[in-house]
Every structure is written in structure tokens, then in C-alpha cells.
Image: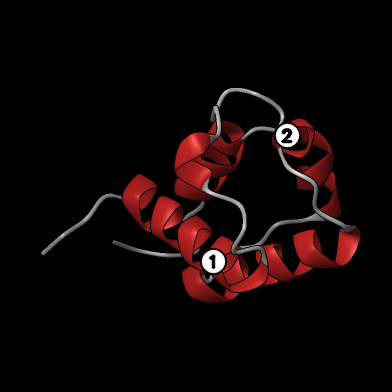
Amino acid sequence: MNISREAQVWAALHQAFSRVAPEVELDQLDPRQDLLEQVELDGGELENILMLIEEELGATITPEDLEELSTLDEIVDSLSSQAAFET
């Protein structure tokens, strides 16, 4: 079964949030709105979520990326376009 990169990223996001911030239901969030305006995460939670996503996908999220990525859609698009992992 070959799933899309976008689906892989969404699956990694769901897994990371369920481990670090299980109270957050990604399906209830607007993927086009600022993530941190929709949920309360402290810096440690966000860092852990990003580390889990990086490990799962073999992708890299730089500090510069974080400054530019504020919505779930932006995160998914950015990670989906990276050549670091293959479907």
C-alpha cells in the first residue's frame, strides 16, 4: 500500500499529539488557522511533538521553519515537500 506523503505527515502529527498532548483533537482544529491560537501548548510540548515528527518521518524542522510555519496546513505542506523521506 502506497500512501501519500501528506497522509504520512498527518499520521505522524496525530501520533505525536496523542503521545504528548492527548487532550488536543487535531480533527477539531482548523488546519488553516494558527495552531498556537487554537491550542495551549508549552514550549516543551511543542518541542517534543516536533521531535517525534522528525523521528517518524526522517524529516527536519529548523528554527527558521518554525518561524514560518504557523498552521497545520503549512506544517504538512512543508514536511510533505521534503525529500528526506520516501513514500
List x then y, in percent, for residue 44: 86, 67
Callout 2 touching callout 1 (CB < 8 Å): no
Name the residue: 68% across, 63% down.
Answer: 50
Q: Tell me the element at label 2.
A: loop
Q: Residues within 10 Å of mark 1 (few under 14, many from 20)?
A: some
Separation of marks 2 and 1 at Cα, in angstroms: 19 Å
List x then y, in percent, for residue 58: 53, 71
Q: Tell me the element at label 1.
A: helix
Residue on which the image places disc 1: 18
Vertical relation: 19 (above or below) 12: below
Residue at the outermost front position: 23
Which residue type carries mark 1? Ser
Name the residue: 70% across, 36% down.
Answer: 35
Q: Which mark is residue 70?
A: 2
Vertical relation: 62 (above or below) 40: below
24 left or right of 61? left
Query: Which image quadrant: the N terminus?
Result: bottom left
List x then y, in percent, for residue 28: 50, 36
Which residue type carries mark 2? Ser
Q: Which mark is residue 81?
A: none
6 left or right of 4? right
Residue at the outermost left position: 1
Residue 62: which quarter of the image?
bottom right
Query: Which image quadrant: the C terminus?
Result: bottom left
List x then y, in percent, for residue 77: 51, 37
Q: In this rendered view, identify the residue nearer to me: 65 or 17.
A: 17
